[in-house]
Amino acid sequence: MWVDLIITLVKISFILAITVGFFAPVLTWVERKQSALMQDRIGANRADIMGFTVLGLFHIIADALKMFTKEDFIPDGANKILHTVSPIIALVPALLTFAVIPFGGQYTLFDKEVNLVISDLDVGLLFVFAIASLATYGYVIAGWSSNNNWSLLGSMRTASQMISYEVTMGLTIIGVLMVYGSMKLTEIGAIQENFWMWGIFLQPVGFFMFLTASIAENKRIPFDAPEAESELVAGYFTEYSGLKFGMFFMAEFIEMVTIGAIMTILFLGAWHIPFLTTATLLSWFDFLGTTGSNLVVMLIHVGVFFAKVIFFIWLQMIIRWTLPRFRYDQIMRLGWKILLPLSLANILVTGLLILALN
Amino acid sequence: MAYYVNRRSEMTWWEKSYIPEIIKGMWLTSRRFFYNLFGFIPFFLGTEKDRRIMTVYYPEEQVQYPVAYRGRPVLAQNEDGHPACVACGLCEIACPAYCIHIEPGQNTGKQNQYERWPDVFNIDYAICIFCGNCEEACPEEAIFMSDDCEISMLDRKQMLYTKEQLLTPVADLQKRIEFTRNMYAKWNY
């Protein structure tokens, strides 16, 4: 009992440390540096401590200090409670989805089965979508409560865009469910031990549609109409400053990690290395004993998982700094007229293929 | 003949989907990304980096300017430490911005010594327009445009450089001296 509790606490703190403590701050730096390198610039590198710049990594500290010391501004006529609560509503779902995301398989450590997922729900995939769509409320309330035309327009766009693309996302997931026959994310991950069972081979169209839809869900650049700087100042967070603005910012970056993690589990073989089964890996480190070999394999798997997540983050950043913004009607057309029929067709073809092959 | 641009060219179905263009764009940007990512490693190791990477890590990395570059004008200082300038005032007259101020000093009759020299020679870089007319006007090869362009001060008064600050050994200016001799052909008579 106590051991289980401690293991769960360790897993929760690991996830919090790696998302809030590592990914969210480092991604602000990565975003600036990567865009700089793509555009033949140098990027942020001036913040230094005692003459050391470390490629501009100290800008993270500088940004955090700036956010903490800024005035926390609530505009006149704004709904104070909702204005304060909405960043939290936006941030929490992004973190909460990690509760069901497995970042490794099952390992035997000290005669104890350790499952590297905080809560192994039977309806894990549904839980992810249920929680992720809660974030929409945060964005809509943020725009509505700040008593500003730009914010309201931004939140209206957010609502329509998120709802449109959630349909596609959900329908794409049905194809994945049909292939794997399970909603348990750990099971989906375990099936992909076989390289040819990776989701990207079984659901290639679904992969690209899911990528598109999830970038639209995250409101990053090809789909950033809700916060379009050139049209709506900053969209739904126009009236936010200081740490509340930072929370919206952090929510965006953590959502990037979430998207990367879900994509990794559904389509890119979760924590598995191609052509290397867990049993093979375990036999390689057999000389370390059961616990030792399991520990090494666990570390390798967690590393591989986060390497894949980082690849997806890199991909999202490349897309963000390559493509221009869609017009609002183009976003709607892409969502309803192209992606929705395509995802329905994807389900049909998947079903027919499964019927034919069985 | 008028030139017409066909703005209504028919796109194929594949082109309309934008997928090829998206792939092309992402290929370009990711190529630049990796190119710059690995191209900057030699700089941090302290070696020469690939010439094709144009971006300069500016304050740490400096560009070698060509000889023809006109930076701030400086005074040539002979090997014995005396200025080559004879305080004739031609550069003062040639200067379109009136940034040069000269007060001459001269020999009181001693033999085998310099006859004339500037007692005061001030150039106000806040006014200077870096045209190079002073260099062209100088008959004594005494004033030259250097390759130094980093003259920013917190106070405007500091921009006024006196003779001591302007004097630069001839040895440092040799390239520019050769260049001006070719350029203006002053000494080719």
Image: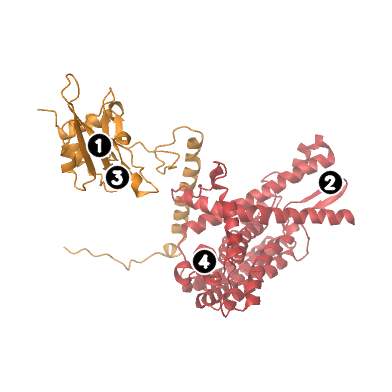
Chain colours: A red, B orange
Task: Please tell me which of labels 3 and 1 falls first in the chain.
Answer: 1
**Callout 2 touching callout 4 (CB < 8 Å):** no
Which mark is on residue B125?
3
Query: Nearest the camera: A59 or A122?
Result: A59
Q: Please, what is the three-letter code of the amino acid marked with disc 3?
A: Tyr
Task: Please tell me which of labels 2 and 4 falls first in the chain.
Answer: 2
Q: State left or right for residue A13 relative to residue B74.
A: right
Evaluate whether label 2 is on the same chain as label 4.
yes
Q: State left or right for residue B18 relative to residue A345.
A: left
Which mark is on residue A109?
2
Q: Which chain carries label 1?
A: B
Q: Which chain carries label 4?
A: A
Nearer to us: label 3 or label 2: 3
Residue indicated by mark 4: A223
Q: Gap between marks 4 and 3, in whole Å? A: 50 Å
**Where in the figure is residue B38, as x and y percent of width and height?**
50, 40
